[in-house]
Each structure stands twice: as C-alpha cells, then as structure tokens.
Image (cartoon, rainbow, N blue to C red):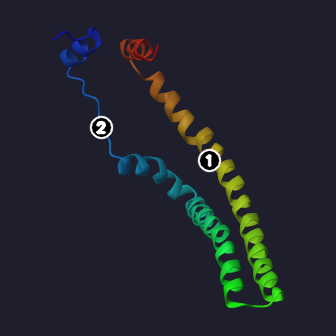
Amino acid sequence: MLQSTAEQTEEEAGVKEKNYSVAQNLFYIFHPVWKEKPHYMLMLIGEAVLSIGMMLMAAAVSAVAVSSLEKGNDVIVLIGSIMAFFICYGAGNVVYTFLKIRNSLIHIEMRLEWYVPELFLKCMGMSVEKSEQGAKTAG
C-alpha cells in the first residue's frame, strides 16, 4: 500500500497525532474559564436550563387548555391559566434572552483574550515543515 510523503515523514520523525476525548477537550476549553469567570459557567447552565424550560412551557400551554376544557372549567379560569403561562413564558424569555446575549459577549471576549493569542503563539512556534504540511492538507 502506498503512503503519502507526509505520512512517511511523520513516521520517520516519530510524530504521532494526539487523540483527545470529548471530556478532555471540554476540560481544556472550560478550565481557564472556570478559574477566571466562574459566573460564566453558571450563566451557561442557566441558559441551557431556561432553553429547555421554555420549550416545555410552550408545549404545556395546550395541555393545560385541553385539560381545563375537559374538566368543564369556566372560560375565565381557562383564560386566566393561559395568561399565567404567557406571563411566565414572557418573563422566562426575557431572562433567557439576557443570558444568551451576555454569554455570547463573554464568549467573544474569551476567544479574543485567551484562545486567539494561544493559537497565534502555537503557530509562531511551529516548524516550517509542519506548517507547510498543514497548508497542503487544508488546500
């Protein structure tokens, strides 16, 4: 079987690609964030929980309306329960939107402060052969 010249050079140099698990990659990404901005991690969790909660609440409105009609409740009770859902949904949506915008701003800040300089330094320390090899495989 024929090997490409890049594979031959890697084997000759003894270079192996490192394989990392998803958990290791997440730890690598979020460890400095947890050390510097632990509130960001809590806001990410809050955004995820609210996202799921908003979907469940939107699905529950129809179930409550049907249940109220089956029980034979007054129209006032039906309208009141639907309005209560809409008020809770609106309040949750305001908080969710705030967290989503805030998290995206922090995410941009993290990329500019931590990851871009680290990537730049890694590229600057890379050998010419390795960078040319990467350019050939990418193109």
In front of the other: 10 or 44: 44
**Residue 75 appears in which quarter of the rendering?**
bottom right
Residue 101: % across, % down: 71, 53
Q: Which mark is residue 1?
A: none
Residue highlighted by disc 2 = 19
Tell me which amino acid carries mark 1.
His
Q: What's the residue at 65%, 71% (across, down)?
A: 57
User: Residue pushed farthest right?
Assistant: 76
Q: Is 40 above or below relative to 26?
A: below
Residue highlighted by disc 1 = 107
Q: Earlier in the sequence, mark 1 or mark 2?
A: 2
Q: What's the residue at 45%, 14% (across, down)?
A: 135
The number of numbered discs placed on residues in the rendered structure image is 2
Q: What's the residue at 77%, 69% (across, down)?
A: 90
Name the side, left or right, on which 135 lies relative to 68.
Answer: left
Tell me which amino acid carries mark 2.
Asn
Q: Quadrant of the N terminus?
A: top left
Q: CA distance from mark 1 to mark 2?
A: 25 Å
In front of the other: 88 or 30: 88
Q: Residues within 10 Å of mark 2 (few under 14, many from 20)?
A: few
Residue 131: % across, % down: 42, 16
Q: Residues within 10 Å of mark 1 (few under 14, many from 20)?
A: some
Q: What's the residue at 65%, 43% (across, down)?
A: 108
Name the side, left or right, on which 84 lies relative to 71.
Answer: right
Residue 7: % across, % down: 25, 16
Name the side, left or right, on which 61 lies relative to 123.
Answer: right
Residue 121: % across, % down: 49, 29
Dot 1: element: helix
The answer to whether marks 1 and 2 mark residues whose Cβ atoms lie closer than 8 Å is no
**Residue 65 appears in which quarter of the rendering?**
bottom right
**Residue 42 appears in which quarter of the rendering?**
bottom right
